[in-house]
Amino acid sequence: MIRFSNQELHVIGKIDYNNAQQYYEQGLREIQSQTVFPIVVNLAELESGSTLALAILVRWLRQTPQAKGLQFKAVPPKVMKIIQSCHLENDLQIIQ
């Protein structure tokens, strides 16, 4: 599900309605235990992008200092399209 290593939060697997709350809570625990920001959220191992996955990412972001403590890496194309259609490109820090 969630793995933290080398200042990166790796999101692994598929987020769906049955496990979304678990992903949120596990990721939030990892984020809140950190003292150095920004944290890179690596989505390379996310199996499927959805509005639900994006909602979790935004909820995590809101829990960081000044709501700017996350950077997103390896964003799946479907999630990127949702971000663009919602005009969130300027709100989310997306890195290569």
Image (cartoon, helix red, strand yellow):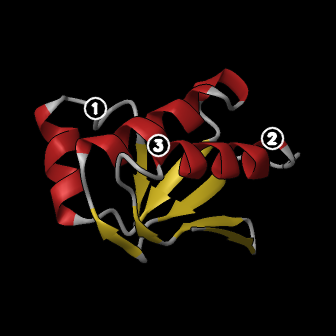
Which residue is disc 3 drawn over? 57
Residue 5, quarter of picture? bottom right
Which quadrant, please, contains the N terminus?
A: bottom right
Instruction: Decide which of tag 2 and tag 3 comes sooner along the chain.
Output: 2
Measuring 46% from the left and 40% from the top, which residue is drawn there? 56
Which residue is disc 1 drawn over? 88
73 w.r.t. 25: above or below: below
Q: In the displayed image of the protein, which residue is found farthest to the top?
A: 66
21 w.r.t. 11: above or below: above
Which residue is disc 2 drawn over? 32
Q: Residues within 10 Å of mark 2 (few under 14, many from 20)?
A: few
Measuring 80% from the left and 41% from the top, which residue is drawn there? 32
Between marks 3 and 1 in the image, the one whose residue lies nearer the viewer: 3
Measuring 43% from the left and 67% from the top, which residue is drawn there? 43
| Image location of residue 13, percent across then percent down | 43, 72
Instruction: Decide which of tag 2 and tag 1 comes sooner along the chain.
Output: 2
Instruction: Decide which of tag 3 and tag 1 comes sooner along the chain.
Output: 3
| 3D distance between C-alphas at marks 2 and 3 | 14 Å
Quick one: SS at disc 2?
helix
Which quadrant, please, contains the C terminus?
A: bottom left
